[in-house]
């Protein structure tokens, strides 16, 4: 993850916050520095400020898009429709207005990364689990899993955030959508369904419950 912003307070804050959320974070304090870093060592995603002296965010976005399809989320203090349109037309994948909620930024970044992974058709692996976003197929220890659409979405959420504690509210939003009236009891039922299929061959548990907090995908300690 590369954060490009000339505001040192913002880059310092985002470095700590995104690292705590499980991202590997690199920082560039300006457009030219950010463009050079991105071209030299292409990141998984870019958080890009629009208003910067010299090479601004729109120019950086345009030049990054010419060289590849890295996911780009633009940040700006401007909330005009024309400004959002300008950012998107230069190739940005998403747009967030300052001041922003950190949880929303993280959720949008994770959504961009999941979409990029699906577009590339890359298989996602953890322990003896494997998932193919292109075909919506999944396997455990070589055994094909017969998953419903919601079970697949739930497994995808876990596999894209391994070893991270995922709250019930976050999982509900990711799997059932923002504003859904589905409650946590339904989530518990689906986690149970998914566990049953993951452990049907006698394999050890991978999805663990943290009571009062949420769930985590991790291997059992030996």
Image (spheres, grey):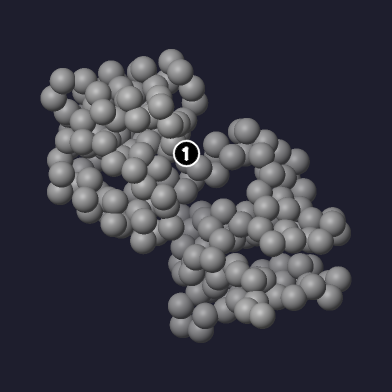
Q: Residue at x 64, y 71 (%)?
A: 219
Crowd band around label 1 with a 10 angstrom C-alpha radius: few (<14), some (14–19), many (20+): some
Q: Residue at x 62, y 39 (%)?
A: 118
Horizontal side of 136 relative to 165 (left or right) equals right
Which residue is labeled 1 in the image? Answer: 44
Q: In this picture, is 39 found above or below 95?
A: above
Horizontal side of 45 relative to 119 (left or right) equals left
Task: List x then y, in percent, for residue 44.
Answer: 47, 38
The quarter of the picture where residue 204 lies is: bottom right
Q: Residue at x 48, y 69 (%)?
A: 165
Q: In this picture, is 118 found above or below 202?
A: above
Task: List x then y, in percent, for residue 187.
Answer: 59, 70
Q: In this picture, is 137 found above or below 34?
A: below
Horizontal side of 98 relative to 112 (left or right) equals left
Frontmost residue, 153 versus 4: 4
Considering the numbered disc 1 on the image, is that residue within a helix, a strand or a loop?
Answer: loop
Quadrant in the picture for the N terminus: top left
Horizontal side of 1 relative to 27 (left or right) equals right
Q: Can residue 159 be spotted in the picture?
A: yes
Task: List x then y, in percent, for residue 222.
Answer: 66, 80
């Amino acid at each position: 993850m590369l954060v490009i912003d000339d505001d040192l307070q913002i880059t310092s804050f985002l470095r700590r916050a995104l690292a705590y959320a499980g991202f590997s974070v690199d920082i560039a304090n300006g457009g030219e520095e950010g463009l050079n870093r991105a071209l030299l060592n292409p990141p998984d995603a870019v958080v890009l400020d629009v208003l910067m002296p010299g090479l601004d965010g729109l120019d950086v976005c345009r030049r990054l898009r010419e060289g590849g399809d890295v996911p780009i989320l633009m940040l700006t203090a401007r909330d005009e429709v024309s400004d959002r349109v300008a950012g998107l037309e230069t190739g940005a994948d998403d747009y967030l207005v300052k001041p922003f909620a950190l949880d929303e930024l993280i959720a949008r970044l994770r959504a961009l990364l999941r979409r990029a992974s699906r577009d590339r058709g890359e298989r996602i692996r953890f322990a003896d689990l494997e998932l193919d976003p292109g075909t919506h197929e999944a396997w455990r220890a070589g055994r094909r899993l017969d998953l419903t659409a919601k079970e697949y979405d739930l497994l995808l959420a876990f596999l894209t955030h391994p070893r991270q504690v995922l709250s019930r509210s976050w999982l509900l939003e990711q799997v059932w959508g923002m504003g859904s009236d589905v409650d946590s009891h339904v989530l518990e039922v689906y986690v149970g369904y998914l566990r049953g299929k993951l452990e049907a061959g006698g394999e050890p548990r991978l999805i663990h419950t943290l009571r009062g907090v949420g769930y985590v995908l991790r291997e059992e300690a030996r």
